[in-house]
Amino acid sequence: MSGLTRRKFLGAAAAVAAASSCVTVSPFAIGGARKKVVVVGGGIGGATAARYLRMMDASIQVTLIEANKDYYTCFMSNEVLVGERTMDSIRFGYGGLREQGVGIVHDRVVGIDTDRRMVRTRGGQRFSYDRCILSPGVDFRWDSIDGYDAGVAQKIPHAWKAGEQTLILRRQLKAMPDGGTVLIVPPPNPYRCPPAPYERASQIAHYLKTRKPRSKILILDPKDSFSMHDLFTDAWKRHYGYGTDNSLISWISGAEGGRVEALDVKAMQVQALVEDFTADVINIIPAQKAGSIAFDTGLTNDKGWCPVDGGSFESLLHENIHVIGDACVAEPLPKSGYVANSDAKVCAAAIVAAFNHGKAPQPSWINSCYSIVAPGDVFSAVMVYGYKDGKIVKAKGAGGLTPRAFDADMRAREEQYAYSWFRNITADVFGLPAGI
Ligand code: FAD
């Protein structure tokens, strides 16, 4: 490698990879014993980390352990609920990662011995590691609403992990008679994808307006406001009569008694702070915490999330384990797929640098979140983040929201960007031909 030292090249390559979702870095091998990284969880964060580790340093032996054979993206799953797209269009396999030399194991991790650096699976396999990356996503606080638990969720779906849950809610919406009520219970903060419950309400509203126009949606919220509140309520006024006597959508805030305390499944009734409500379809999205393997490994704080060093995502509680994606606390980053994808690149670059006694490159993150509220009416929030004095900070002058004033051309363009973002991020995560 003439003129450019290996370490400098590594730093430059990693910094570029961290900043862009579409870049390809030439692999190269580094002498000495092969380092081993075990990645737990092959969702957005885990699959990206595994792939980028191999791209940044092909000498690393990367093993990705994922419980399921296929991954269903949560993003665009709201469209599946209302029949606008198929389940197959949000399903992704691991062939692309395999082709890039990632060892794929379909099994559930049931224990991590942090002293011996050993990962154990339900199927009885053991994997030693130099570094382990966890991206297990979220689990639910089943004790937060009386009468709601994992068993009941088969009948009253959360649909907050895409797959079977998405199909249950889709079937219920389809079977509901015209004139029925859909009740949506969003979670308290913090949770996976802050705008998504309200995007879901918007898309279900569009479905009802066009197929079952006498039906209603009631949102019972523990919060007093929510992500992109004004953009959503403007859209609801524009499309669904929000604020009128005949509104398709009603939203009751926490201050107005929207907090749901108990569920009676037989009666299809929820008990909120001041009143009981019955509905034909109930979608409860429970309060959330880090995926259970993070608890079992002792990686969580008293709030149920994993504290990490923002420059490397190494756990502050155990050495040589990194936690990325929804499970970690990395404020001000939101819990989103785009952030999990950026975390993974920052983390992979830091691990490659550590293996090579180098300095981790300057991290950066991108988040953009598109909300599809009706066909041709889409808005987004975008933010770029940097790292300063050991803290993740919003980059000054970068990012922003779609303007509140409605511009049909701009909203239609945002719709195209949303679909192109979906194609590109899934290509980047799962190693597929570029999307566009
Ligand atoms: P996940 O993607 O959930 O991956 C976790 C993986 O770990 C899973 O595959 C799971 O099977 C596996 N796993 C867990 N425990 C184990 C174990 N013990 N052993 C083996 N495997 C294990 N984000 C956006 O950026 N844009 C959007 O438009 C957007 N829309 C959304 C819409 C909805 C309705 C929802 C619910 C979410 C949306 N998100 C969006 C958020 C995004 O889906 C998550 O933030 C993202 O998936 C987080 O990635 P992760 O790697 O942390 O977790």
Image (cartoon, helix red, strand yellow):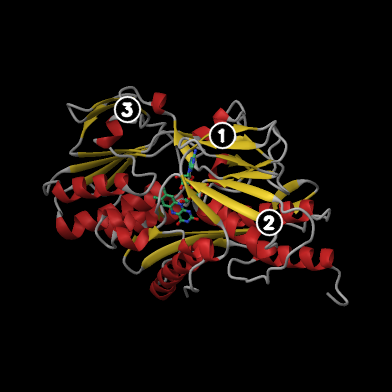
Eye-nearest disc, 1 or 2: 2
Q: Amino acid at mark 1?
A: Ala
Q: Amino acid at mark 2?
A: Ile
Q: Which residue is mark 3?
A: 148
Eye-nearest disc, 1 or 3: 1
Element type at mark 1: helix
Asked where in the image residue 266 lies, by quadrant, the reply is top left
Labels 1 and 2: the sequence-earlier one: 2
Q: Percent from the top left, x then y, of residue 386?
A: 71, 56
Q: Report if the CB atoms under discs 1 and 2 are less than 8 Å apart.
A: no
Give the farthest residue toward the right: 3
Q: Which residue is mark 2?
A: 60
Element type at mark 3: loop
Q: How many C-alpha atoms fall within 10 Å of the one at disc 3: few (<14), some, or many (≥20)? A: many
Specify whether 76 is left or right of 181. right
Specify whether 121 is left or right of 250. right
Element type at mark 2: loop
Q: How many C-alpha atoms fall within 10 Å of the one at disc 1: few (<14), some, or many (≥20)? A: many
Specify whether 316 is left or right of 151. right
Q: Residue at x 30, y 51 (%)?
A: 242
Q: Percent from the top left, x then y, of residue 244?
A: 26, 49
Specify whether 351 is left or right of 67. right
- Marks 1/2: CA–CA distance: 24 Å
Q: Which residue is mark 1?
A: 294
Residue 363 sits above or below residue 65 on the image: below
Labels 3 and 2: the sequence-earlier one: 2
Say if residue 52 shows up in the picture: yes
- Marks 3/2: CA–CA distance: 44 Å
Eye-nearest disc, 3 or 2: 2
